[in-house]
């Protein structure tokens, strides 16, 4: 049997670049078209309700999966492990796999040496959609009923107050005083400012006063839009102007930044929803 010739290093690099560009364009198209908040909402529910391997993927990979028209994708052997077989002729979709490098640095405050891991780029792993497999039936997908976000701000130590309209601003969050000031009663404004507050409270990748403003706004805007979709409120497109920050010609860098901030969106949503669930549970126990 004739063997398929191995690709040269240059051919392998060209393939990686092509897949990276395709992944980046998928994200940018979804964000520019306004589709991403719906995908973020679906991915958030998936991660909280499903036992599928993809429920533990990063939101970036879940986005690539959902953009391919499925809510469940797995590797060839993962499908075999649950009694399903990939159909003949099925084409794989590719999810990202971070390439990392670990460096030892000296902590400026303690003088101790600490290891830090950095993402240097991305490789890609083939997976197949459930629609492209056949065999044993899978468990029913049963998303949970989401709790309301009434008391989340207070639990996070953030006060909420209303003020008269102030020019173009519909509301704002101040981390130094831990308060949300709303100049509008619409839900998306509250969700946006609540997302800012949650972002500042993340243990990793937290926002700071010195963080890039564009990045903080992308995360708050995207998280707020996803929350609106989760709770049945209308929300317009996430501003396409924000995307220019990530498209400076370096595909690997742009993809790395987009994947990172999408991860922060997931962390913001998880913090808000888990806080809401604990608040609801506490109320139920007190009743």
Image (cartoon, helix red, strand yellow):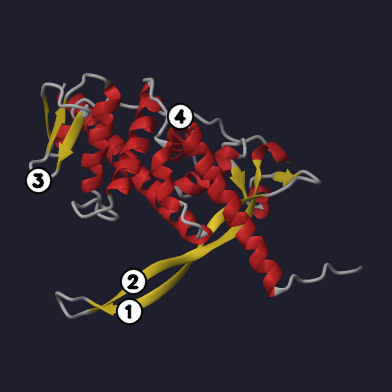
Q: Residue furthest right?
A: 1
Q: Compared to 170, does 270 lie above or below?
A: below
First in residue order: circle 4 vs circle 3:
4
From the viewer's side, name the closer residue of 15 and 226: 15
Q: Quadrant of residue 284?
A: top left
Q: Which residue is mark 2?
A: 116
From the viewer's side, name the closer residue of 49 and 33: 33
First in residue order: circle 4 vs circle 1:
1
Q: Which residue is mark 4?
A: 143
Pointer 1 with pointer 2, Cβ within 8 A: yes
Pointer 4 with pointer 3, Cβ within 8 A: no
Q: Quadrant of residue 106?
A: bottom left
At which x and y percent is residue 164?
Answer: 11, 21
Q: Is residue 205 left or right of residue 91?
A: left
What distance separates the C-alpha of mark 3 from that of mark 1? Answer: 33 Å
What distance separates the C-alpha of mark 4 from that of mark 2? Answer: 36 Å
Q: Which residue is mark 3?
A: 176
At which x and y percent is residue 185?
Answer: 21, 19
Q: Compared to 76, does 163 lie above or below?
A: above
Q: Is residue 134 left or right of residue 169?
A: right
What distance separates the C-alpha of mark 4 from that of mark 3? Answer: 37 Å
What distance separates the C-alpha of mark 1 from that of mark 2? Answer: 6 Å
Residue depth check, mark 2 versus mark 3: number of the one nearer the observer? 3
Q: Which residue is mark 1?
A: 104
Q: Residue furthest left?
A: 177
Residue depth check, mark 4 versus mark 2: number of the one nearer the observer? 2
Instruction: Categorize mark 4 by other alpha carbons within 10 Å: few (<14), some (14-19), many (20+).
Output: some
Instruction: Categorize mark 2 by other alpha carbons within 10 Å: few (<14), some (14-19), many (20+).
Output: few
Q: Quadrant of residue 225?
A: top left
């Amino acid at each position: 049997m004739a063997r398929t010739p191995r690709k040269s290093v240059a051919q392998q690099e060209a393939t990686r670049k092509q897949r990276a560009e395709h992944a980046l364009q998928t994200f940018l198209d979804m964000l520019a078209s306004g589709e991403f908040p719906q995908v973020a909402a679906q991915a958030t529910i998936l991660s909280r309700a499903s036992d599928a391997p993809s429920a533990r993927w990063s939101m970036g990979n879940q986005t690539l999966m959902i953009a391919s028209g499925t809510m469940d994708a797995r590797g060839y052997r993962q499908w075999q492990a649950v009694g399903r077989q990939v159909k003949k002729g099925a084409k794989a979709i590719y999810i990202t796999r971070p390439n990392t490098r670990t460096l030892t640095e000296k902590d400026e405050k303690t003088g101790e040496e600490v290891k830090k891991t950095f993402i240097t780029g991305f490789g890609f792993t083939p997976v197949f959609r459930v629609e492209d497999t056949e065999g044993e039936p899978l468990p029913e997908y049963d998303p949970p009923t989401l709790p309301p976000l009434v008391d989340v701000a207070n639990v996070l130590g953030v006060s909420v107050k209303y003020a008269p309209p102030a020019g173009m601003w519909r509301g704002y969050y101040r981390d130094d005083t831990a308060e949300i000031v709303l100049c509008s009663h619409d839900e998306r404004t509250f969700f946006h400012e609540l997302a800012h507050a949650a972002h500042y409270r993340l243990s990793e990748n937290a926002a700071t006063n010195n963080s890039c403003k564009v990045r903080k706004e992308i995360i708050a805007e995207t998280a707020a839009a996803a929350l609106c979709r989760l709770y049945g409120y209308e929300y317009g497109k996430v501003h396409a102007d924000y995307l220019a920050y990530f498209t400076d010609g370096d595909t690997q860098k742009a993809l790395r930044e987009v994947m990172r901030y999408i991860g922060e969106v997931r962390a913001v949503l998880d913090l808000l929803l888990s806080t809401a669930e604990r608040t609801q549970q506490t109320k139920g126990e007190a009743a």
